[in-house]
Amino acid sequence: MMSLDNRPVYSGGCQCGAVRFRVEGALGDASVCHCRMCQKASGNFYQPLVSVRGAKLTWTRGAPKKFQSSNYAFRGFCGECGTPLTYEAPDGVALAIATFDHPEEIAPTIQWGVEAKLPYVDAIPALPGKATLDDPEAGTFLRGIVSYQHPDYDTETWPPEERP
Ligand SMILES: [Zn+2]
Ligand SMILES: [Zn+2]
């Protein structure tokens, strides 16, 4: 999507929808960081982040709660659902790539902190892989699931008025 003055526009937010953001302008470096702090802050093997230092970041619904992870940086997350959202340092903010509504557009180009890389991370692409519907019983189970995850676009109201 583009803004009226032809700048790229991105949107995204946390899993529950209490926190939503909008970014206008060009994104900076997209990376994954293997450092132990990023592992903890993301609850994951490594943290994918994209710098929005050179763009305009607006919180369009709510705002992240913050944990000061060092004398240098803060980690922002949704206070309602816990989704990791930001890495905030004096030189700028980076957003968690998978919280964008279209993370497929933001491919990482560099890895940081590789000395802390978990030993099995590089082996994951070689693991056996199955699609969700490969299991014949999954279809029946999945039809019974009602998602409470916020959709990948901005909505008028939050929280949703009714929940089946
Ligand atoms: Zn949330
Ligand atoms: Zn890190």
Image: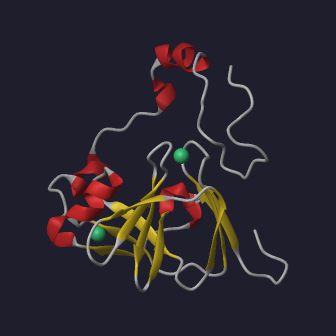
User: Is residue 101 in sight in this rendering?
Assistant: no
Q: Nearer the viewer, residue 139 or 71?
A: 71
- Place residue 32 in its image quadrant: bottom left
Q: Position of residue 151 (x, y in %)?
A: 66, 43
Q: Position of residue 148 (x, y in %)?
A: 60, 32
In the picture, measured across the screen, residue 40 lies left or right of residue 137, that is: left
Q: Nearer the viewer, residue 60 or 141?
A: 60
The residue drawn where x is 46% and y is 49% is 83
Q: Nearer the viewer, residue 118 or 21?
A: 21
Q: Position of residue 89 (x, y in %)?
A: 39, 78
The residue drawn where x is 63% and y is 42% is 150
The residue drawn where x is 55% and y is 18% is 139
In the picture, measured across the screen, residue 44 lies left or right of residue 94, that is: left
- Place residue 75 in its image quadrant: bottom left
Q: How is the image coloured?
A: secondary structure
In the picture, measured across the screen, residue 126 lies left or right of residue 61, that is: left
Q: In the picture, which quadrant includes the N terminus?
A: bottom right
The residue drawn where x is 39% and y is 72% is 31
User: Is residue 19 in sight in this rendering?
Assistant: yes
